Image (cartoon, rainbow, N blue to C red):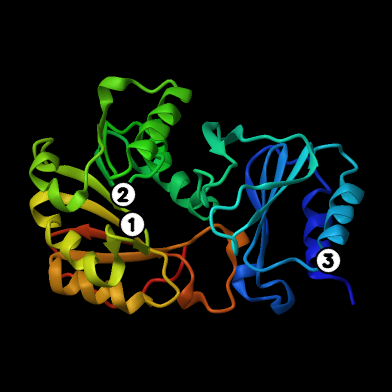
Amino acid sequence: MEDPLHSAIEKFFSKIRLEPKRIFHGRGQLFPEYSHVCMDWYPPVVFVSAYDPIENRVEVLSWLRGVDKLSQIKTVMLQKRYERNSAAEILYGERKTRVFVEENGLKFEILLGKQQNTGLFLDMQPLRVWLRENSKNKKVLNLFSYTCSLSVAALAGGARSVVNVDLSKTSMRWGERNHDLNGQDKDTITSLPFNVFTSWGRIKQEGRYDLVIIDPPTYQRNSFSAERDYGTVLKKMRSLCSDEATIIAALNSPFLDEQFLLDKFERHVPKAKFVELMAAAPEFLDRFPERALKIFRFEFSSEQPSHRLHACRG
């Protein structure tokens, strides 16, 4: 029986790959023997995330080198997520701590060092496409903006302005570099390196928003807990949103299902109508979809709102 990781690697590198993408999503539990392994492509780097030791790591490296007939792989790096603050290890090639990738014509800075996240959530790729297609002339608020990739996509789609809010000044500077990489007008970008929960007054000063993106961490010590704090964020939506605003709300917790957020909206934003559950990138298939990334679209309208989960993914 063919090894599922080897098959994924072979299929992926059978053609030229110019854009970042997940190669193998072991965390989706479809292949129990590799449930601790994820593999991403940030050209020209293969970045392996291991949540437990990979017993056949030498074999995996040989697979990567063996299938690279088109000479695309320059570096293979391993991040040991099971070791706290562990720097990424070089398995092959030269160390690359920073690369610049292009996704659908948009440029992003990727950092491959000690931090757990590289700066671009690959499962959010369809949302970036959607924002580029649906942000024209809109005033956008991006809460928990991280490296601002969603704001970059919105401005590329013709958004009138974006307001980025994130507690981390490091992430905010990273986001500003991403905006610069794409030649976006600084006059259309407001960066607020503040705690969302203590900055509502400052956020409101920018006026009412036509599109609000809420993409918080599932849990961040002393900062955010989805179960505890999501409702607090939603309570502010009516005062922040224009009359026909759209809200994109993400939930990436294996312990909170879709109904959790639907109930929060029904309680705190009853006038917002549930429109759809949006799809994550197809490479992120999960044996238990209710535990995977969930992206909701709600809209304010004059119609009777509904919070039933009646729409399909995508």
8 on left or right of 51: right
Instruction: Indicate the amino acid at tag 2.
Output: Phe
Nearer the observer, 59 or 237: 59
Instruction: Indicate the amino acid at tag 3.
Output: Asn
Q: Distance between the residues labelled 2 and 1?
A: 5 Å
Q: How far apart are marks 3 and 2 (CA)?
A: 38 Å
Query: Residue 282 falls in which quadrant of the image?
Result: bottom right
Q: Residues within 10 Å of mark 2 (few under 14, many from 20)?
A: many
| Residue under numbered circle 2 | 144
Q: How crowded is mark 3: few (under 14 residues within 10 Å), some or many (20 or more)?
A: few
| Residue under numbered circle 3 | 56
Residue 272 on image: x %, y %:
18, 63
Report whether residue 38 is seen: yes
| Residue under numbered circle 1 | 216
Is 204 placed above or below 4 here?
Answer: above
Instruction: Indicate the amino acid at tag 1.
Output: Pro
Element type at mark 2: loop
Residue 43 on image: x %, y %:
69, 38
Report whether residue 241 is seen: no
